[in-house]
Image: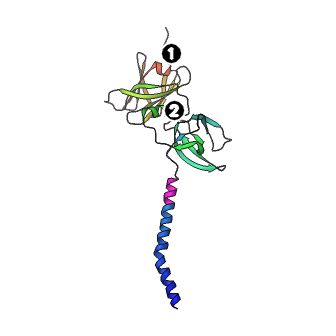
Amino acid sequence: MQANLVSKSRASSLGPIVALTAASLLFAQSVSSQSDRPADFYRIDVGYSSLNIRDEPSTSAGVLVRLKTGTVVRNLGCRVLEEREWCAVEPPVRGGVRGWAASDFLRPAAPPSTATDVGRNLLAGARLSATGQIACAIAPEAPLAACDFGIVRGGTGNAVVVVQLPNGEKRTIRFDQGVPTSSDAGLIVIGRSGDVTRIAIGASERYEVPDSVVGRERARD
């Protein structure tokens, strides 16, 4: 009987310890699961080569584009397939190429913030034809200021221009035969002043794009 009482007493004293240990294990598991979460942004790391971005999470899927080491991409979510982890990625700008990348070649990265990073990632997935600055403003009464841009040209006067706005956002404008035809913010209104195309988007945004930026040919007499 005495042995029984001692046993019960020990069990009773061990109760809080067992509970505390269980709680500690749960906390450790929680921290572990959080630290294992995929990053919001990744930097591609394949040495001196380029990484295949595929249309499906498989090595047999088609290649959409090849991105160079150092390119920063946004992570849209990861999953394991064919005993390998794949992450859906896109450049941190609207209109870029979305696809799947093997996580073996992705390293956690901070979102691009400097002008250099922005220029490098404006049109990730395509070789930039040029980078530079054009005049832009995002408020009706605001004076025009120099805004960074990146451009991919697709022939005479055909191009996609992505502009880094003063508020940190980006604007994508498409040109066909040297004329702006659409943007990722809706309808545009255009005008001309010499060899500069003036663009208005919405009620507040204004841009001035020289013909030399998009490769527009001058009219001939």
Give the number of callouts: 2
Residue that extends furthest to the bottom in the rendered view of this protein: 1
In the image, 45 versus 150, the foreground residue is: 45
Q: CA distance from mark 2 to mark 1?
A: 24 Å
Looking at the image, which is closer to me, 17 or 217?
17
Q: As shown in the figure, which amino acid type bears the numbered disc 1? A: Glu
Rendered location of residue 156, percent (x, y): 54, 19
Instruction: Report the residue that reaches farthest toward the left.
Output: 141
Q: By what rule are the colours in the image chosen? A: rainbow
Give the amino acid type for the residue marked by disc 2 in the picture. Leu
Residue at horizontal 52 percent and vertical 88 percent from the top? 3
Q: Does residue 186 appear in the picture of this structure?
A: no
Q: Residue at x 58, y 36 (%)?
A: 47
Q: Residue furthest top?
A: 221
Q: Compared with residue 86, is residue 205 higher up or lower down, i.e. above or below? A: above
Q: Which mark is residue 217?
A: 1
Residue topped by disc 2: 123
Could you tell me what secondary structure mostly forms the magenta stretch? helix
Say if mark 2 contacts mark 1, CB within 8 Å. no
Q: Residues within 10 Å of mark 2 (few under 14, many from 20)?
A: many
In the image, the segment drawn in magenta is: 29-39
Whether residue 134 is visible here, answered yes or no, is: yes
Mark in the foreground, 2 or 1: 2
Badge 1 marks a residue whose secondary structure is loop
The stretch drawn in magenta includes residue 157: no
Circle 2 sits in a helix, a strand or a loop, which is it? Answer: loop
